[in-house]
Amino acid sequence: MSHGTAPRVSEARPLAGSSVRRHDGDAYVSGRIGYTDDLSLPGTAHVVLVRSDVPHARITVDVRDASTRPGVLTVATGRSLAGEYGPIPNAMDPVPTGGQPLEIHVLPVDKVVYVGQPVAAVVAESLAQALAAAADVKVHYEPLPHVMDPEAALAADAPLLYESWGSNVMLSGTVGSGDVEAAAARSAGVIHGTLRTGRGAPAPLEPRAYCADWDARTRRLTWYGTTQAPHPLRHTIAEFLGLRERDVRVVAPPVGGSFGFKNFGHPEEYLVCVLAVALARPVQWTEDRASTLRYGARDSRLAYTASYDDDGRVTSVACDMVANHGAASATGAFGMAFAGSLAMPSGYQVPDFRCDYRVVVTNKGPWSPLRPFGKEAGVLLMETVMDAVARRTGLDPLEVRRRNWVKADQFPYVTTTGLELDSGDYEGLLDKALTVLDYAAFREEQARARGQGRYLGLGVGFEVLPEGADIPGALIGASDISTVRMSPSGDVTVLTGVTSPGNGNDTAIMQIVADRLGVAMDSVSIVQGDTDICPFGFGNVSSRGILTGGGSAALAADDVAAKLRQVAASMLHVDDAERLVLRDGFVSVDGDLEQALPIAVVAHALYTVGYIVAPDVEPTLESTRTFRMRNIRHHADDDGKIMPFSTFSNGIYLSVVEVDIDTGVVDILRHVMVHDCGVMINPRFVTGQFTGGVVNGIGAALTEEVLHDPDGRQLSTGFKTFLLPRASDVPAFEIQHQVTPSPFTPLGTKGAGEGGVACTMASLLNAVNDALSPLGASITELPAVPHRVLAAIGGGQR
Amino acid sequence: MSTTEHDHSTTTRLSLNLDGTDRTADVDPRSLLVEALRDDFGVTAPKIGCATGDCGACTSRVDGQITKTCLRLAVSAEGSQIVTTQGLAEDGELDVVQQAFWDEQAFQCGFCLSGMIFAASELLAENPDPSEQDIRWAISGNLCRCTGYEAIVAAVRTAAARQREIPQRG
Ligand code: FES
Ligand code: FES
């Protein structure tokens, strides 16, 4: 027992829940972080891609002239490589769920399916030489009819992108349960509607860059690049090249933003490997902005029928989703349609629900995974339905939501799409939001403003995000491995299979480990993103870096801590090692610093005098552990449903906008955000995820849209034609957190990486429509760019 | 595989004072300044996010003026004094804006930092007590895809407050 006067260790783990700074932030702000394109291996050859000018054609490529140009090392085409290399591996395969087989080659063998598709790769000593020679590659096109619109692509006589499929549907399916038609028939009212989302794009600030280096002597390939998933990528590169996995090393330098785009399955990831093997030297490719913007997402049409009763309860929802995937890709992006359907009916109790989805290919660039991975479709649908029911019943939109929400005491709650929602307090979110925004006062202000010819609107957006995915058959899992080791000087190294796209999960994992070992942050370092050094992991995907990377690091750190306790117990002559507390750099008996040893001394003792101080303790201060979410279920239930998601963070947003009805410009006046992602390891990092997501959502709702002309050419090829919101376009956000821990994670955390996008899209859509309601106008398509808003007003009462 | 031709696109000698050091390199006269800085001088703090002047990732200070270095040809900078974020720290000590960006977690992936940090520095040089709106306008020539700008605005405010408290260096 310690005495009142004795010096004691801190009461609580000092780092948990604290917003410590990025451990390597000084290197970032002083420009010393090396991203992939900042590397330059000696002897690197440079790749320039020749791209298709037409949306759909058979091609023959003549590279004879280009090959003779100065500095050119090789010019590859789909044909020149087809003999040796098959299609690239798919990150996810649609076939097991009844979809079509995907055969994506590093370069297309005989036909192009979108403008901008690479058709040849020129490799030269310098980038300038490669660029010059690329102009001499001659592509002969035998044009085929093209189709850009998914509904047109569904027509019986539509041109087929992939003839062997027999149609342009890559995958279709149905989720939900119950009988929506019967439910609608016995309900008080029925609503029909359509929602459309424009084509968005992930558009990280850093374009993709890949560099492969083949060592012909050791027959080993080293790959550096912008990837979220080093281990899965290594697996697929090895499979593609016919190498053993041990002969491929994937290194992921710091990444300049990903948002799903830099998961794996891009042809160029494998193309640089092929070229490096052929040339036995490092080969580098860095894309330009236009190339980055060829990869899109969303671009979906949701047609719905919802029924309700007079008390505002939604009795059924049926949704027909047509998703315009553009060209096929191996990135698993098609899964966004499935995830978007499963995310319905969100956190609402809708007894009868069905969503039929179809993923349709057209002659646009391919879909890319993009946060929140399609789930915005579910959120937009349900938030639109809630507002529509409010209008029909005359109830307040907030009240309609309260009446339909899953209640705080109903968790775990199984939705009609088969997801088991872990925990939540949705009404609590709204209550909190209303402490920030005086709802009644706003309604008065709105009425006053209308009297002055100003159109203010308030919109609600509520999201529940299924995250922490584990996809059967794919290298996307809800588990990860971490190693924690302590050196003789007490230095701690964490090796983990999760990677950071810049969100700071590395620092947060260090916080977790430092706390468990009772050491300061600067005693801990972390290694991520190198398959030769780090244990296997799924990288960063589906918001699970802290769940699984943090969870496994916590388990491993606990093992090392237990070992330190054992050794210290022996050194301090204490029988019960459980009495030892690791904190503030000391191992102490019951927290009493007068009976304590520095942790570094204990570590050193085990390494150097272990036979004396702890002869029975295995002398290793290292542990490798796996953490796996236990609420995933891959065996189908009686209904044929699986549970592929493990956490369900949620949030509610209230947006206040003013619509200028003469210009169609939407101005965001207030954006109140309340979020619940369970326990936050580093609240500032978490907030940063949400504010970033919100601005992604603002872009998707108001400004960002990839457009094409009727000839299939992409018009949005840079930041002048694809408008990301700037600081002056967005207001200061009013941010609140609610903490409802997940019962399934050791630290109570949930995913935090996808939040804010979907409910911002929904709250802005609803806010614009609230503003337009006195005009009898409404929009059903995002982004709400001025011409769409004006068209809606024109179609209203005016 | 060219054997007969040689591409000796003539290079031009370019001399700069780069982050406080006189440097010389042979550059392709067609190079953008950002390309020369990165590829020929090996200073990679300026990034290429667009090459069209829209994102600001390539920003450096050229002869005292913050400049999107993708909008200038390298040869036009002959004899210039160029400072990148790599050269902002004095004796390894971060300047007040860099420090505030770190303390306020004003970045995630960090790719936008050159533009944001220089824009903030320029604002604070002109206006020691900027309003929220001033800050948003000052950084609006730069794009950030990760942070939602909120933390960047906070960092600029913090830097301004700290700068007002401490007497200017030198
Ligand atoms: S790279 Fe210069 S502004 Fe984007
Ligand atoms: S931090 Fe990633 S672009 Fe700003």
Image (cartoon, rainbow, N blue to C red):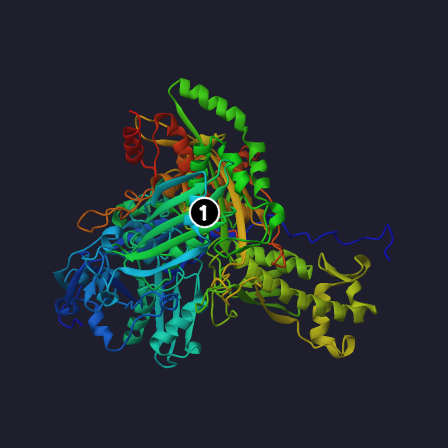
Is B143 left or right of A54, judged from the image as shown? right
Measured from the top left, where is residue A600 in percent x and y?
70, 65
Measured from the top left, where is residue A271 in percent x and y?
30, 68
- Callout 1, which amino acid? Ala
Please give the name of the residue rendered at 45% of the width and 67% of the height, measured from the top-left corner. A475
Please give the name of the residue rendered at 32% of the width and 37% of the height, measured from the top-left corner. A785
Which of these two is toward me, A48 or A394? A394
Give the residue furthest to the bottom.
Answer: A217
Measured from the top left, where is residue A509 in percent x and y?
58, 58
Q: Quadrant of the N terminus of chain A?
A: bottom right
Is A301 left or right of A557, judged from the image as shown? left
Which of these two is toward me, A341 or A254? A341
Question: Could you classify mark 1 by the number of other residues whose Cα lies within 10 Å: few (under 14), some (14-19), or many (20 or more)?
Answer: some
Which of these two is toward me, A651 or A160? A160
Q: Secondary structure at mark 1?
A: helix
Please give the name of the residue rendered at 47% of the width and 59% of the height, measured from the top-left corner. A540
Measured from the top left, where is residue A279 in percent x and y?
28, 74
Instruction: Decide if ligand 2 comes within 8 Å of the CB at mark 1.
Output: no
> Residue at label 1?
A183
Please give the name of the residue rendered at 50% of the width and 26% of the height, measured from the top-left corner. A442
Q: Quadrant of the C terminus of chain A?
A: top left
Task: Say which chain tag 1 marks.
Answer: A
Classify A155 as above or below B155: below
Residue B6 falls in image quadrant: bottom left
Label count reads 1
Residue B144 falls in image quadrant: top left
| Residue A286 visible | yes
| Residue B102 visible | no
